[in-house]
Image: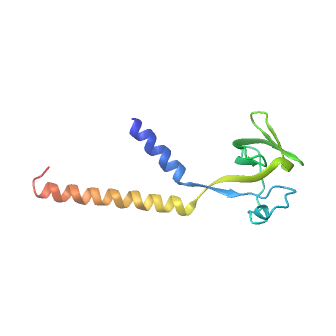
Amino acid sequence: MTTAVVLSAVILSACHTRMPVVVPGATSTSAAAAVPTDLKTHDKVRVTLRDGTMTTIVIAEVQADALMAKDGGRFPYADIARLEKSRVSKGKTIALTAGLMMVGFVIAIALAVASEQGNI
């Protein structure tokens, strides 16, 4: 059971990636390299503040000058150094699926060969 939970967590995390999001009103070079994205209610984002504090929040409201978190926290854009949004990575998901299928195929062949030789 524990192995299944750990394996599920690894698989689910392997299929996600974090994309930098443009912070409204930001002037830093890192913000210029970020992907313009519309932030919406219920989006899960990682916020890095200018003082280095990092936290992950679920957006409750996108305001003109700040993000409101579901837990009641308010993050003014002026205090945000970096903003990243979690997204499903098609490439990682395809690679993971192909890898798992290949491992299953190799195990099936190994079992078939061992069975033919009477080792099972």
Front in this rendered view, residue 31 or 15: 31
Indicate how the structure is coloured in the image: rainbow
State the residue at coordinates (33%, 56%).
Answer: 104
Farthest residue toward the left? 118
> Left of 117 or right of it: where is 112?
right
Task: Say how many tags the image has.
Answer: 0
Front in this rendered view, residue 117 or 57: 57
Image quarter of residue 21: bottom right
Farthest residue toward the right? 64
State the residue at coordinates (16%, 56%).
Answer: 114
Image quarter of residue 38: bottom right
> Left of 25 or right of it: where is 109?
left
Residue 102 screen position, x and y as percent: 36, 61
State the residue at coordinates (77%, 62%).
Answer: 36
Residue 81 screen position, x and y as percent: 78, 52
Q: Please tell me whether residue 27 is drawn above or below residue 49 in the rendered image.
A: below
Residue 15 screen position, x and y as percent: 54, 54
Front in this rendered view, residue 70 or 26: 26
State the residue at coordinates (43%, 45%).
Answer: 7
Residue 51 screen position, x and y as percent: 77, 46
Farthest residue toward the front? 51
Quarter of the image that includes the N terminus: top left
